[in-house]
Image: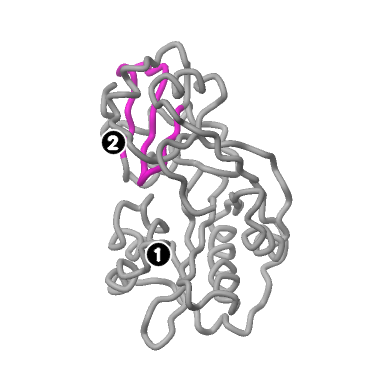
Amino acid sequence: MIRVAPPQRDDLRALFLPDRPGPLVGLHVIQTGLGELLADRWPEARVAIAHAGQDRQIAGDPGALGVSDLLALGVERGMFDAPAEFEPLLEAAFPGVWRWPRVIARLDGAVPRSPLDESVRQLRPDDAPRLAALDAEIDWIWAPWESAERLAASGMAYGAFEGGRLVSVATPFHLGAGFEDIGVVTEPGFRRRGLNTACVARVVADVRARGREPSWSTSPDNTASLRLAEKFGARKDRDDVLYMVGPGPSP
């Protein structure tokens, strides 16, 4: 596989279109210049693999990808978003790969007001140390942005603070062309206070201001996440699956 430099990545955009609600790793790495994009050949790529954090997306022709190409990625843990046609290749390359069911929804309702809205603000570059200090259970929130510093400087994240400590963060996890998939985390000791709702509300408003539609991805058994999405008018788009290598992440 050939590594495609950021200036040339847009030439592979068609492989990842049309976008839809849910994981959007390919478009995210194209539009942000972050992560990694690999192609089977250049130009006229037939298949591509996008990589941001521990998330990967495969798009294109399964016949142009081999087991050796997947093995060369050196993946020990992470997820693949891929059409079902790639499942035999993934199973051959990664014994024990498992299917993680997902519920994908569009957030097209009104943004709820919260008494905590005033405690939430947009993260700034100088918030990077606070973002990096999040509990290890939830620091995956900045992984698709490569570092806490990049997410803090992106202008895309909003956080709630208590005593100067960052305790809840929401941000578009992946930036697509028409959709942005939202993620939110809250420190274990600060949950069930409505902080996640207040943070997501600010992000949803931003996504819509950019002319895009917010989406939500979660596990079918994650009732807390599903309830949160309902507050924003979640409308189910589809059931989906991710292919997981190694131990599972938080739902």
Disc with the residue nearer the chain's start (1 vs 2): 2
In the rendered image, which quarter is residue 130 located in?
Answer: bottom left
Name which residue lies at 48% across and 77% down.
189
The colour scheme applied to this rendered structure is one colour
Count of numbered badges drawn on the protein: 2
Which residue, given by chain and number where applicable, does mark 1 sit on?
A: 155
Above or below residue 201? Residue 164 is below
Does 24 appear above or below 229? above
Q: Is residue 137 magenta?
A: no
Q: Residues within 10 Å of mark 1 (few under 14, many from 20)?
A: some
Label 2 amino acid? Pro
Residue situated in front as seen by the camera: 3 or 192: 192
Foreground of the two, 212 or 152: 152
Residue 196 at x, y = what percent? Answer: 56, 70
Query: Is residue 52 within the magenta segment?
Result: yes
Q: Which residue is mark 2?
A: 7
Range of residues picked out in magenta: 36-58
Residue sitting at x 59%, y 51%: 218
